[in-house]
Image (spheres, rainbow, N blue to C red):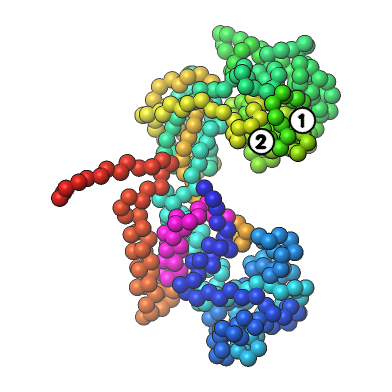
Amino acid sequence: MPTTTWRVARRDIARPFGLVEFDTSTNLTTDDKIISTELTNRYTVDDHFNGQWFVTIVLDADTAATVTTGAVPANGIGTLTRRVEDYTASSGQLTIVGANLLAEDESVTCDLYNTFHPDDYKRAYNRARQAVFPRLAAHKDHKGIITDGDTLKYTVPSTIRQIDRVSLGQAVLASHGQNLLTNGGFEEWDTDTIEATETQNSWTLSGTSSTANKESSTTGPTNHMVLTGNYSARLYVPANNTTLLQTVTPSVATQMVEVSMAAYVYCRVASSITLSLDGDHNTSNYHGGTGWELLQYSNTLDINDTSFTAGFYVNGGTAAARTTSYIDRAVVWAGPLSTPESMWDVVNGWEWIPPLDGASDGGQVFLPGRPRDHEVLRLNGRNLLSSVSADTDTIELDGELLDPLYMKCRQFLCEEKAAEDAESDWGRRARDFETEYEFWFRGEAYHGSRPGLVVSRRGPF
């Protein structure tokens, strides 16, 4: 789902209370004045903004950096807010309270907020995101958990605070006919160890003191570090940044083609190992350190690429991230926009126990029976909308779903004002916004992980 920046959201929340957006016509200097002919043209009465209006500098008005965000003002992006002390209509000049501004080398875009300080909107939203959950939430689709046939209980990631659906998928194996990797299942070994700078059975290792070792399957007891076949790779990284890569030169098209990779990795340290494609390792999706996880990554190749590298990157330059990891079932496709998946079987009768005693995870999910061994457990769920602190922070909603969120924020703002002045109409306005919020959810509005059932009736009933 697309997101909305906090700057956009704050402005929309503020409009019923009074919001004016304008550009300065004279570059700011080191004084307490902000001048805009836009204000002169629109607001012709002196002192119109005196007292309860707050001005915030939100952006450079030019496009020196990008059309989307503009350059960063010397006074910061949405970080400087001052109360207006005086307004002169003839010149469009605002005199503000507090220390002098920093000089700007171009015009800036400013917002004027009536009654409520921008920090009030931030506080109201960070409270509202909790109040609207789970009706409005950041929806999650987690495919990282790998099942064990003898295990019924699995730890839920901390990013999921409510589970809507549990599914079980069949693993995509390295032996898949469309896999572009050679020896993606690490079944072929000339020797038991790949040393740093050595290439063996299509894989090349870099990283001083690091090794890739053959891990063999066993029975009675089972070696759970081998998922499929006879072997997996045990990647040992004691000191330095390390890569385990192979160069892929396929017969299929590669130039400016989307390349997708998936692999099963076991690790007990978060933010240590991740996937790498065409020299770019996926820093936004490191392994979570929960045991076996399915890692996935996609990258677009360069305009002249007839080959590319694919494999693994370990952040061994950080002592806390140095690890031993186990790797199996590595697959790569060129062309599809995501790694192919098998069909998902819905699991019924599961139970979820929330985090106990202040645990930092997402609780535990209990399956009703033994799952298939070494398959992907998929959790569809929800988390709170992200908190905001800066103008560039984002909310995981857009479009029509923003309306009820905005109503709840306005309700909280009005309730705070009502507490200050019981004789005012702020209490009534708070109730009006609360009613609009509740009304939005009546009828057929549904925001779970899949559409709700709609039953149509005909006749007079």
- Classify mark 2: residues with Cα within 10 Å, few (<14), some (14-19) or many (20+): some
> Farthest residue toward the top?
220
Residue pictured at 61% horizontal, 86% vertical: 40
Q: Please name the residue shown 56% across and 32% down the image.
A: 144
- Kindly identify which numbered label has been placed on residue 258: 2
- Looking at the rendered structure, the number of numbered marks drawn on it comes to 2
From mark 1 to mark 2, how far is it between C-alphas? 13 Å
Q: Which residue is mark 1?
A: 306
Residue 44 picture location, percent across and down: 56, 89
> Could you tell me if residue 450 is visible in this image?
yes
The three-letter amino acid code for the residue at tag 1 is Thr
Q: Amino acid at mark 2?
A: Glu
Q: Is residue 266 left or right of residue 345?
A: right
Q: Main secondary structure of the magenta part?
A: helix
Name the image quarter holding residue 450. top left
Q: Is residue 90 above or below residue 303?
A: below
